[in-house]
Image: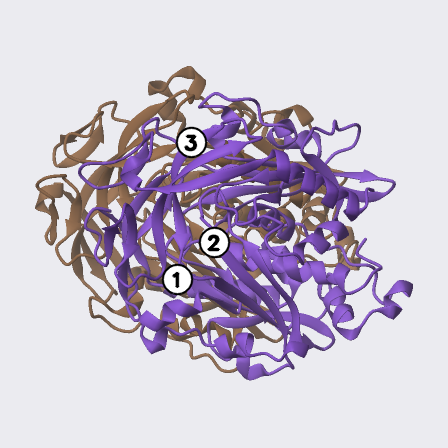
Chain colours: A brown, B purple
Amino acid sequence: MRSLEEFYRALDDARERMFTTVERVPLDALAGWSADPATGTIRHHRGGFFTVEGVRVDRPGHPVDHWSQPIINQPEIGILGILVKEFDGVPHCLMQLKAEPGNCDGIQVSPTVQATRSNYLRVHGGNPVPYLEYFREPSRHRVVADVRQSEQGAWFLRKRNRNMVVEVQGEVELLHGFHWLTLPQLHRLLAQDDLVNMDTRSVLACLPLIAPEPEHERDRDRDEFTMALLRSCRPGSPTRHSEQNLLSWITDTRVRTDLSVSGVPLTGLPGWRRVEGRISHDSGRFFDVIGVQVTAAGREVARWDQPMIAPYGMGVVGLLVTRIDGVLHALVQLRAEVGYVDAVELAPTLQCVPENYDVLPPAARPPLLDEVLGAPASAVRFDTVQSEEGGRFYHARTRHLIVETPYRPELAEHPDFRWVTPHQLSGLLRHSHYVSMEARSLLACLHSLATVSSPAGVR
Amino acid sequence: MRSLEEFYRALDDARERMFTTVERVPLDALAGWSADPATGTIRHHRGGFFTVEGVRVDRPGHPVDHWSQPIINQPEIGILGILVKEFDGVPHCLMQLKAEPGNCDGIQVSPTVQATRSNYLRVHGGNPVPYLEYFREPSRHRVVADVRQSEQGAWFLRKRNRNMVVEVQGEVELLHGFHWLTLPQLHRLLAQDDLVNMDTRSVLACLPLIAPEPEHERDRDRDEFTMALLRSCRPGSPTRHSEQNLLSWITDTRVRTDLSVSGVPLTGLPGWRRVEGRISHDSGRFFDVIGVQVTAAGREVARWDQPMIAPYGMGVVGLLVTRIDGVLHALVQLRAEVGYVDAVELAPTLQCVPENYDVLPPAARPPLLDEVLGAPASAVRFDTVQSEEGGRFYHARTRHLIVETPYRPELAEHPDFRWVTPHQLSGLLRHSHYVSMEARSLLACLHSLATVSSPAGVR
C-alpha cells in the first residue's frame, strides 16, 4: 500500500501533464454540432454522443405544476467500473486520474473504467479503453456489484450507467495514470473538495461497507456516532422500517406519482431564451446550456467542442442522520425527477439550489432546508463540496452535508420521507433505480466517516 | 375452513347466476369504439380502457430480426390484490368468483380485488370496488407483497399491474361472490384446467412459499421430489448461482439486448390484413384482433363491446426442474419481449405456441422444446391448461408443464439460461420486472406441488 503522500505527489505531477483549457463559445459556433432546423435539438453531426433537447413537464398538484426545460438525452448505457485486488490481504481499488473540461480544479479521481458505449465499442475510432476486458467479461472474475443506476434526473433524460465493482486475482499491469488506493484512502480523499469525481462516488456507494463484527476489540476507542454507523451497516441490525415496508412505500409512491414528460422543440421553449449564444432561463436561474471549446493535454483527443450544462449557484445535498436504538438511520425522501426511468427514487433529506427558490412559489421550498443548513457546527459530521460529472456539467458543484440530529419522529411525518439504515440502502443498491445519484454520493460520504472518524479504518 | 366440496357447490351455483355470452362481431361494428382515421388505432370514445395500436419491432442479430404487430396499450397500473386473514391459525385468502368474456369455461377464481385504475377511481362511474380500501391504504395492515409486475410482453405494451397481498386482523365482512380459501386449497384448484385465473396466479407467485423447517417430523412421509422442493423454498439452501451472479447476468443481458419498438400505424401494418372484420397475420398464425359483443349476467354492466386478442393455437410454457445437492432448481431463461419495460425478464425454460414455428425460420425454434414436450410421463410433475386474462384475451389457453430431469449442466450452457431455486425467484419477485407473467404462473404451479404431492400441506 502506497501512502497518501505518494498519491498526492503523483496528483501534483499529473496536474502538470494533464489538463484542459476551456473557452466558452456560442452554441452555434460549436464545430461538429448543429441545431436541427425544425426542433432546435442540438446534436453532433456523426450522431452518438448526446443531444440537448426540449421537454415539457406536467406535475398536477405540485407547487410548480408545469414547466419546460432543456435536457441532455444520452440513451447509451456506459460502464463505470472499479477494479479491486487484494495486496497483503487489503483490498485496493484501481483509480484513474482524469481531467474533464467541466472540472473546477482540473484532475479528479475516476473509476478504473469510465466509458460510454460508443467509447468502449470504439464507434468513433480511438484507442482501446484500458482494463475494459475485466468489465466486458465479468463472469471470469468475482463480481461484487453490477447494476444500472440513474444519474441527475433534473438534467439527464433517462440516463443510466452500469456501475460495476470487479475483484480480480492474479497480476494486473499498472498503467501510467492509474493508482491502487485502499478504501480508507479513498474515504480520506472524499473529505477534500472537488477531488473524488461523481462516477467514483456513484460506484463506491454500490459497494456495501463491510463493517467489523459487533463490539469488536478495536471498536472500543470509537465514539458513539461511529459505533452507530458501523452497526447500521451490518445485516440484522434493528431498523425503523422493515424492507417490505420500504418496498411497499416505494411501489405506492411510484403508482401515485403523476409526472409526465413530453418532447417539445428546444426552439422557442417557453421560459427560456437565447442570450449571447447560450440558452438561459428568463429568471437567470436554474442552468444555462453553453458551448465550450476544449483544448486538452494528456488526452487522446487534443481538441473538441461540445455543449454543456452550467448550473446557476452551488447545489446543496444534505442527509439528516439519527441514532435509533443505537443504529444510525438516514432521513431519505422519495423524489420525482423529470429524467427518471421510474417516476421516483430515494433522494437525500435535502436536495436543492437555495437561490432558485427566490423565483419559485413559497410552497416549493424544501421542507427540511433549515434543519440541514441551520444545524449547529457540533452536529455537522461531513461538509465538503463535491463536483458533478465534468464531461457534461460545467463547474457544477454541490455542497455535501451530513448532519446528526436527535431522533425526532415528526421529521419523518411527511409521507415522502422515511428513516432508513445505510445497510438498507446498500440492499436496494443491488437493484436499479431505487437510490438516486445524489443519495449515492452522500452514502459514499457517510461510509467514509467509518474510516475518517476512527484511525482503525474499515476492513 | 370450508371444505373444497362446499367451494365446488358454490362454484356450480355461481355458474348459473353469473355468465357472459359473447358474440364475435366486426371491429368496425363495436359500439363505443372507433379506429383513428389517420393511424387506425382502435380506442374507446370516452378514452381510458385501452387501445389497440401498431408497433414495428427491430431485433438485429435475432433469427426474426424485424416484424410488425398489433399490441394492446393499457398504460394505467391496476391493482391485483389478495386479502389474507387467519382463521384458527390457518391463513385464508379471500377469492372472488368472476366471469370474463374471454374465459373458456365461464367463471374463474380471481383475486379479492382485480381493478384497473379507472375502475377503482370510478372514472366511468359504477359502484365502489369491494375490499378496495385494504389495498388503497395498505400501511394500515400487514403488507406481505406489494410490487408492480409486467404482463404478457408479446401482447401488452409496457403493461404493469400492482400485485398485492395484504394480511388483516379483525372482522372482514364476507360479501356475496367471495370465498375464503386456504393456500393448500388454492394449490389443489391449480391442478384443474382453466379454473384459477391469471391474475390470481400472478399474485400467488409473489407470495413466497413458507416451507416447514428442514427435515421436520411430518416431512418423513414425503417423497424425494417434494423434499427437494421444500428445501428449495427455504432461505440459506445451497444454490447453483449466487444472488449477485444472477443480478449481474440480468444486468449484462439487459445492457446487451438490442430490441427497439416504435409506434407505426395499425392501418396497413406490414404482414397483417383485415379479414372479415378482424385483423389477422398473413400466415393466419400468431393472433387475431377481434371484436366481441358481450352480454353479462351477474355483473354490474350487462352489455358492452370491446376488441380482444384471440391467439392462434394453444400456448405451452414449461419448466425443467432438477435436484442439485438435494435442492430443486428450475431452468429459466432471460427472454426479450416487445412490451417489456426493461428489455428482458426471467421466463420459463420453454414458452411458445408450437404451431407458429411452421411459419418461422428454423433458427427461431426454441432450444429445449423437445426436452419439455418429449419428456416421459414419469418425469412430468405438473400438466394443466391454464387460462390467460379473460378480459383482454379470447380463449387464450396455455398448457403448463413442469418436468423433472436429472441434473445435466449442458442444459444451461446457453448464455440465456440458468438454474435458479424457487427461493431465488421469490427474492427477485419482491422487485419489479425480473420475473415474467409466464414464469410467475409456473412458479405458482410449482409451489402448489408442495401441497399436492403431500397431504400434510404447507404451513
Q: How crowded is mark 1: few (under 14 residues within 10 Å), some or many (20 or more)?
A: some
Label 1 and label 2 in one chain: yes
Dot 1 or dot 3, earlier in sequence: 1
Amino acid bearing label 1: Val
Residue in view at x 51 percent, y 72 percent: B417
Q: Which residue is drawn at 49% across and 54% down?
A: A189
Q: In which quarter of the image is the C terminus of chain A?
A: bottom right
CA gap, disc 3 to disc 2?
Answer: 20 Å
Task: Please indicate, yes or no, whether residue A123 appears anywhere in the rendered image.
Answer: yes
- SS for callout 3: strand
Question: Could you classify mark 2 by the number of other residues whose Cα lies within 10 Å: few (under 14), some (14-19), or many (20 or more)?
Answer: many
State whether discs 3 and 2 lie on one chain: yes
Q: What residue does disc 2 label?
A: B396
- Chain of the residue on which disc 1 is drawn: B
Pointer 3 residue: B304
Amino acid on which the number 2 mark rests in the picture: Ala
Check disc 1 and report the residue beneath it.
B255
